Image (cartoon, rainbow, N blue to C red):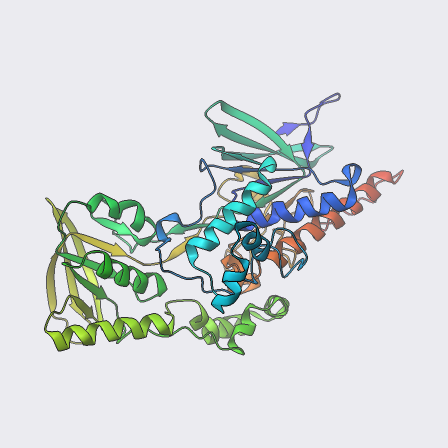
């Protein structure tokens, strides 16, 4: 634990961001727009650190024909600032495709196009970010018995450096989730690495792929592998009778509204659980109906022609997978009869989702000052700030990992623009309160966690 010493001239930033995915890109944009409005004297100073060498968002899933499942209007800025020069429409204008996009009459861009938009936006605020820099630890800096700043240790090719901040915003994203006991390998993949690894199969003649999962990514992987390898069999394994369609109807989509976050946050825990049960089918283990129809049409056509390459092993589960020399052997068990089928394949792809990174994993002894609920989950305030003991005066904000407190939009793009605006408002409000407190001749001694 560091102590602030008299004459310590180490600069202290208002905010340090850990990770630079879409959420923290949006945060940097909100800061940039704020600073442009208020001028240099009142500007918020910020740094972001990203361990990747350049911006990248689920690159292994950028299948050429895959579309976004969220409207282009829910970009990094529009819901917060419709006049922003960082909007998807401004991106289209800069690329000379605005009229073409309008004529397309589609709310849902290609995923590769939206990724290019993210890269375009990130490049416009790249003065705030250091790529190839991994945050490896956070330590408290104490003054007069309270944690006044946080020291953030960052590793890069140049070694370790320490930076100080009054606030952190953690946007480290999601981690690929594999079934218990299954490890990734040369022929056992998570769908997040599909495109990175599939090129290694060029020049070979794969005969069979197995895709495990019942969600959008699983269905997209099945369609992509079936199309790319026209001689190979593709087996889809899931425990349902078929893919379930995503509920993207107008009323159901209200679960993604900014007002829904307020309602969810204020609701008792039993109501929170019911809301997740009611509306999980807007996002989890569901597939766009157009893709479902395309896959069914394909499998039926193959039955008619007697060339069945697309197989659906439904009401089943994969119980074992072993890599062998040049192949992988999977055991698929029927949930109805218990009968087991052995399948030799070139690759097994697990489209089994993601889990949030531990938000406290980097915080070291600072994590001991973060409060938890009765179920051991991090307590998070409405402004996305972790609730802490009174001795921690710094704000630690989360971009993700708040589904239990803020609802289904925690790790989704739907509310990103609004969320970063709320975090910025909280930062500014707490900064004003802190300045007011420091101006008082005598401290009030309350130690309020609202600081």
Q: Position of residue 184 (x, y in %)?
A: 26, 47
In the image: residue 402, left or right of residue 321:
right
In the image: residue 192, left or right of residue 394:
left
Asked whether 161 or 94 is in front, the reply is 94
Asked whether 333 or 292 is in front, the reply is 292
Asked whether 298 or 172 is in front, the reply is 298
In the image: residue 304, left or right of residue 31:
left
Whether residue 413 is visible here, answered yes or no, is: yes
- Where is 53 relative to 415, above or below? above
Q: Position of residue 21 (x, y in %)?
A: 50, 47
Residue extending furthest right?
441
Residue at (24%, 60%) from the top-left corner? 227
Residue at (55%, 51%) from the top-left corner? 23
Name the image quarter holding the N terminus: top right
- Where is 291 relative to 422, above or below? below
Asked whether 7 or 99 is in front, the reply is 99
Q: Position of residue 208 (x, y in %)?
A: 15, 57
């Amino acid at each position: 634990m560091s102590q602030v010493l008299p004459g310590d001239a180490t600069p202290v930033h208002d905010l340090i961001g850990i990770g630079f995915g879409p959420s923290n890109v949006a945060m940097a944009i909100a800061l940039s727009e704020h600073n442009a409005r208020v001028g240099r004297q009142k500007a918020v100073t910020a740094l972001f650190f990203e361990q990747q060498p350049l911006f990248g968002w689920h690159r292994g899933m950028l299948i050429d024909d895959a579309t976004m499942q969220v409207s282009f209007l829910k970009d990094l800025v529009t819901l917060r600032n419709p006049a922003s020069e960082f909007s998807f429409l401004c991106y289209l204008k800069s690329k000379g495709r605005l009229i073409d996009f309008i004529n397309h009459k589609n709310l849902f861009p290609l995923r590769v196009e939206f990724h290019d938009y993210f890269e375009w936006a990130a490049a416009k605020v790249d003065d705030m970010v250091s790529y190839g820099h991994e945050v490896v630890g956070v330590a408290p800096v104490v003054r007069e018995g309270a944690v006044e700043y946080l020291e953030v240790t960052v590793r890069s090719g140049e070694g370790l450096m320490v930076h100080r901040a009054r606030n952190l915003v953690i946007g480290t994203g999601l981690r690929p989730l594999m079934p218990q006991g299954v490890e990734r390998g040369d022929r056992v993949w998570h769908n997040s690495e599909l495109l990175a690894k599939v090129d290694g199969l060029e020049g070979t003649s794969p005969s069979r792929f197995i895709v495990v999962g019942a969600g959008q990514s699983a269905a997209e992987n099945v369609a992509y592998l079936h199309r790319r390898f026209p001689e190979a069999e593709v087996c889809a394994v899931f425990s349902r009778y078929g893919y379930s369609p995503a509920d993207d109807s107008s009323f159901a989509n209200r679960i993604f509204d900014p007002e829904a976050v307020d309602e969810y946050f204020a609701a008792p825990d039993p109501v929170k659980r019911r809301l997740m049960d009611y509306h999980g089918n807007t996002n989890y283990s569901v597939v766009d109906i157009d893709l479902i129809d395309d896959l069914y049409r394909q499998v039926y056509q193959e039955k008619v022609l007697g060339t069945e390459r697309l197989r659906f092993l439904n009401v089943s589960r994969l119980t074992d997978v072993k890599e062998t020399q040049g192949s992988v052997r999977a055991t698929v068990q029927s949930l109805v009869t218990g009968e087991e089928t052995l399948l030799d394949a070139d690759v097994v792809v697990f489209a089994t989702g993601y889990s949030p990174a531990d938000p406290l994993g980097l915080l070291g002894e600072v994590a001991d000052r973060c409060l938890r609920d009765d179920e051991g989950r991090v307590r998070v305030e409405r402004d996305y700030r972790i609730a802490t003991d009174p001795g921690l005066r710094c704000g630690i904000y989360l971009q993700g990992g708040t589904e239990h407190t803020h609802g289904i939009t925690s790790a989704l793009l739907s509310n990103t623009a609004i969320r970063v605006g709320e975090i910025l408002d909280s930062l500014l409000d707490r900064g004003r309160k802190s300045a007011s407190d420091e101006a008082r001749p005598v401290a009030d001694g309350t130690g309020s966690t609202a600081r």
